[in-house]
Image (spheres, rainbow, N blue to C red):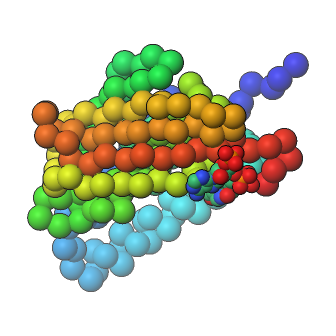
Amino acid sequence: MTEAPAYDTTSFVDLIDAFRDLQETLCLVAPPPAATLELTAAVADVTKRLKEFEAPEGHRVARDREMGSDVHPMLVKYEATDTSDTSLAGTVTFNHAHMGGGGAVHGGVIPMLFDDLLGMFVSRRGQPNSRTAFLNVNYRSVTPVLRALRVDARIEKIEGRKTFVTGTISDGYLVCAEAEALFVRLLPGQP
Ligand SMILES: CCCCCCCC(=O)SCCNC(=O)CCNC(=O)[C@H](O)C(C)(C)COP(=O)(O)OP(=O)(O)OC[C@H]1O[C@@H](n2cnc3c(N)ncnc32)[C@H](O)[C@@H]1OP(=O)(O)O
């Protein structure tokens, strides 16, 4: 019998959301040195408390594949609203923590979203246990922060171990960024 996980994903999502709030707030402030010292100690206390719950690989909530980006502090959270076997539509709202400059999302954050979005989709609807072989991103127009944007993913074709997939981020009718990627399913025992 498989043991039920000792953690509760719902409350962990709340913890991750609180962390995202902290991350974004860090990008909005200019605290004086004394407050910075005090806050550094407070954050170190939280980290020390969290370390009490370190778990072996395979038992860590952040790696819960069912929950995806909802439970991973570094990934960008998105919501899938409509999925079929070959396509996914959803929404994403980038925040101040994702900003590169001038209200635009950082150019490195966008490939991270695509890798996760397309990789999770391939894993769920294409071939589980696949790895990104290539991910090409074109930046078509500025991707704005603080707006609900549309994300789309589509499985274009599957050839043996290879799944070819495309994705877009759009602001209304305007395409902000598009990606094409290849994911290759790992062979048994392949590291
Ligand atoms: C649930 C998880 C969701 C999140 C998903 C996140 C996914 C990730 O970020 S993974 C991390 C980033 N990616 C990596 O680290 C991958 C590093 N590379 C590798 O491990 C290997 O090169 C790997 C697995 C991609 C392919 O290696 P290997 O298994 O030996 O396959 P190999 O035999 O070389 O190639 C298989 C096929 O793919 C093709 N292929 C492999 N790489 C490429 C490439 N870069 N471009 C085009 N074709 C390629 C080959 O030509 C071959 O095609 P065919 O079968 O037609 O001859």
Residue under the image location 35 percent in, 21 percent down: 81
**Can you give x and y, in whole percent of width and height, for residue 131 in the image?**
63, 48
Residue 48 visible in rendering: yes
Compared across the picture, whether 5 is left or right of 106 comes to right
Residue under the image location 19 percent in, 73 percent down: 30
For residue 129, which quarter of the picture? top right
Residue 26 position (above or below residue 190)? below
Compared across the picture, whether 23 is left or right of 140 comes to right
**Can you give x and y, in whole percent of width and height, for residue 15 in the image?**
46, 43
**Can you give x and y, in whole percent of width and height, for residue 62 in the image?**
58, 45
Residue under the image location 21 percent in, 79 percent down: 32
Front position in the image: 26 or 39: 26
Residue under the image location 59 percent in, 63 percent down: 48
Front position in the image: 75 or 89: 89
Residue 50 visible in rendering: no
Front position in the image: 34 or 17: 17
